[in-house]
Amino acid sequence: MKESQVGFLMSYDYELLKISIPLVYKEADHITIALDKNLNTWSGSKFEVKPEFFLWLKSFDKDNKISIFRDNFYNPNFNAMENEVLERKMLAAKMGVGNWLIQLDSDEYFVNFKKFTEELKVRNRYLNDPEKNQIQIAGYYINLYKYTDSGVLYVSKPRNQKFATNYPAYKTGRNTKKRVIYVSSIVLHECLSRTEEEIRTKFNNWGHSHQVNTNSFLEKWRKVDKSNYKEFEDFFYLEPEKWKKLNYVEGKTIPAISENLNYRKLRPSKPFIFSKNFGQWFKFLFK
């Protein structure tokens, strides 16, 4: 127990796992990949997995850290978000309460996973009685918006995201609605930096599928490019104002993009992290 257990959700964009898994492999104690046994998405659509992916996984897993958890994660009586929560809870149960339960999507790329696991280890006391001391550990997303011919447009202001918990009582997505401890870890999120067809597939099948107006979003997404992105604002797919501005960085691959980004400038400051954590501590002091 008290391990760093990493869980990945495997679906239609499973090929991205070839990028995300290597970034956490060395520091993870174990990796569990959740795959619907009927190859259903949360919305009930079917997807296929090429056999070559499993051959890659077997050849990559030199330390025998990876297992695949197959079960039925689609309930036709649930909406997509309810099915997401269902899968996350089932995956966490498989990973084992008493460990740090880190859940990632295939399009989430940790910049320094070792530093994140170190942040978890200094808080191992929360694993002693997790149900009574429920917490979440959040880092920060850099959301990639759209590829250009030589680089990528990304959301200028990082947004926090929960990545780990000691007790997986998820309410929506990875959010348990319990106290959050913020750390300065950065994750590149290949959220919308996809083809139009891939975006439609994502919007039709993920947990927010019932909340997104796909056509309205894509109308702006098509217009924005490297030459005019400063003329636009409000880019988020749910509440547009939450992604106010975009920036641009050179790089056509995730390693190149990561190398060119100025993380020192993007990473939240220590005073900012302290204030966020103090606010959370005070908020839950008497709960």
Image: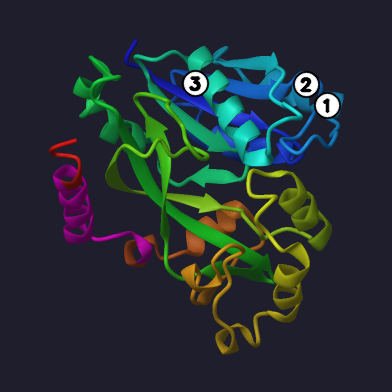
| Res. 149 visible in picture | no
**Residue range of the region highlighted in magenta in the rendering:** 266-282
Distance Cα–Cα, label 2 vs label 3: 25 Å
Q: Residue 112 location, x and y as percent?
A: 40, 43
Q: Residue 223 location, x and y as percent?
A: 73, 81
- Residue 258 colored in magenta in the image: no
Element at label 1: helix
Distance Cα–Cα, label 2 vs label 1: 5 Å
Are discs 2 and 3 less than 8 Å apart at CB? no
Left or right position of 230 against 279: right
Q: Which residue is mark 1?
A: 52
Q: Viewer-nearest of labels 2 and 3?
A: 3
Q: Is residue 277 above or below residue 24?
A: below
Q: Residue 142 location, x and y as percent?
A: 48, 58
Tag 1: amino acid: Glu
Mark closest to the chain's N terminus, 2 or 3: 2
Q: Quadrant of residue 67?
A: top right
Say which residue appears at 16% left-offset and 59% top-offset.
Answer: 271
Tag 3: amino acid: Ala
Are discs 2 and 1 less than 8 Å apart at CB? yes
- Residue 279 colored in magenta in the image: yes
Element at label 2: helix
